[in-house]
Amino acid sequence: MDADQHRAAAVEANNATWELLDGRAHTAEEADELLGRAYAAAHHWRRAADATAVNAARASWLVSRAHATLGHGELALHHADRCAAHTMAAGDAAADFDRVYALEARARALAALGRDDDARTTRAEAETAAVAVAHEQDREIVEGDLAAPPWFGLA
């Protein structure tokens, strides 16, 4: 595949992952499919034409969210930390909502691990940052994602 084909495959895998991030309880086969799609997106973004640290951050977020959805706290936290590192490396190229998603990924991973106090604090940081998202439509999407399960009983 050339870099343009990787970009197209990354977009397709990313969008396909979202089909399985709909709040359902996953069968073993669906869980495998969810992870396969998320990792495929990350794989193709690493090789895509004009890929940036922002693309890497978003791919890491997607993998973290897939693992968190399945209750894989340690892996979710690892990829949340990668998301944060890529977001920081992106600097001003990262959108305001990218910073919120880095916090959300960490909070959700901590909740999956049962580290409720840390998760609650980080989720509150994400919610505060979400209020400052400049574009109204982006802010509504971020707030919806922050409200979406799973939060593993975190109030």
Image (cartoon, helix red, strand yellow):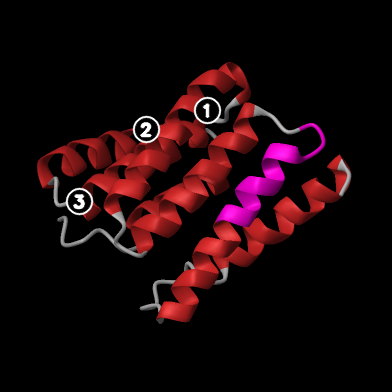
Q: CA distance from mark 1 to mark 2?
A: 18 Å
Work out how far the residue at label 3 is from the one at label 1, CA to CA, in angstroms.
23 Å
Residue 106 lies left or right of residue 114; in this view the side is: right
Q: Residues within 10 Å of mark 2 (few under 14, many from 20)?
A: some
Query: Residue at image x 13%, y 47%?
Result: 116
Does 98 appear above or below 74? above
Dot 3: element: loop
Q: Earlier in the sequence, mark 3 or mark 2?
A: 3
Q: Nearer the viewer, residue 150 or 143?
A: 150
Residue 105 to residue 16: above or below: above
Q: Residues within 10 Å of mark 1 (few under 14, many from 20)?
A: many
Residue nearest the observer in this picture, 100 or 56: 56
Q: Position of residue 20 (x, y in %)?
A: 51, 71
Which one is in front, 13 or 97? 13
User: What residue did someone put label 2 on?
Assistant: 129
Q: Which residue is located at x 72 percent, y 60 percent?
A: 12
Q: What's under tag 3, amino acid-wise?
A: Leu
User: Which one is in front, 22 or 81?
Assistant: 81
Percent x, y for residue 59? 57, 44
Sequence-wise first label, 1 or 2: 1
Closest to the camera, between mark 3 and mark 2, is 3
Q: Which residues are magenta?
A: 39-50
Question: According to the image, label 3 marks what residue?
Answer: 113
Residue hosting label 1: 86
- Residue type for callout 2: Ala
Mark 3 crowd level (few <14, some 14–19, many ≥20, 10 Å Cα): some
Q: Position of residue 7 (x, y in %)?
A: 79, 46
Note whether 52 is above or below 144 in the view shown. above
